Image (cartoon, grey):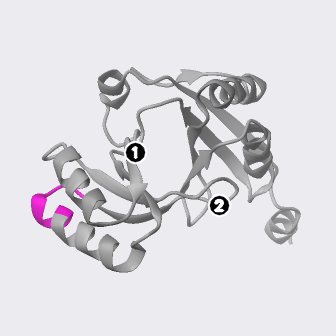
Amino acid sequence: MKPRQVSPDEFVAQVRQWIASGGEALADMYLRRSPEIARLYWLTAPDHAEALLEVARTDGQGSVTLTAFRTGYFRLRGVVDDTFVEQARAAWPAGRWFYIVDLRSFPEKLDCIGGGNTREELEIELAAMLAAHRGRLAGFGEHPLDEKDWLERYGSEAIETTVERPAHPLGSARAEG
């Protein structure tokens, strides 16, 4: 199953609806011509949908793919403490990639503070998270775009749109000159 392709206007309307009914959505911004490549955003207010589209249209050049997820991402959430670490150990689907993110609401992007796919990596990342992020809000789980069967396993809805950004005017002048 793949994300449903929609227009930018449909993307905004659908994400607004998801946030209004469920309180949040996750968005992945894939930047084709950027050293950063991808950004994750936790959208928690309906106006975040329009603001995200504006960022996609103005931040850089080339095309940007936005993918939004309604539910199922970083399913374990909580304040980083010993209990959260134990819950993450129990929640890890052994052998699958996991991510730990510092949950920040839009316009901040999510900060990936750990990840891996082995028991050893899990223990190292959980210890590092506890040492550096104790008391902060974090999420633990799979990145929705890492596994081809993620949408099916979690029964989540996902939509995708592509936004074309204009080429940087100085870049065009340099190419001509």
Given residues 64 and 133, the one toward you in this image is 133
User: What span is in magenta?
Assistant: 116-122
> Looking at the figure, which quarter contains the N terminus?
top left
Identified at 25% across, 67% down, the residue is 126
Vertical placement of residue 115 versus 162, above or below: below
Identified at 72% across, 39% down, the residue is 163
Identified at 31% across, 37% down, the residue is 147
Given residues 153 and 135, the one toward you in this image is 135
Residue at numbered disc 1: 74
Labels 1 & 2 near each other (Cβ < 8 A):
no
Q: Gap between marks 1 and 2, in whole Å? A: 17 Å
Q: Quadrant of residue 80?
A: bottom left
> Looking at the figure, which quarter contains the C terminus?
bottom right
Location of residue 112 in the rendering, given as x and y in whole percent from the top left corner: 43, 63
Per the rendering, the mark at residue 30 is: none
Vertical placement of residue 36 versus 22, above or below: below
Location of residue 31 in the rendering, given as x and y in whole percent from the top left corner: 60, 52
Label 2 environment density (alpha carbons within 10 Å; few <14, some 14–19, many ≥20): few
Given residues 80 and 103, the one toward you in this image is 80
Location of residue 3 in the rendering, given as x and y in whole percent from the top left corner: 50, 25
Answer whether residue 167 is magenta in the image.
no
Vertical placement of residue 63 versus 115, above or below: above
Identify residue type, mark 1.
Phe
Identify residue type, mark 2.
Glu
Q: Is residue 30 visible?
A: no
Q: Is residue 161 left or right of residue 98?
A: right
Residue at numbered disc 2: 108
Q: Quadrant of residue 96?
A: top left
Of the two numbered discs 1 and 2 on the same chain, state the one appearing first in sequence: 1
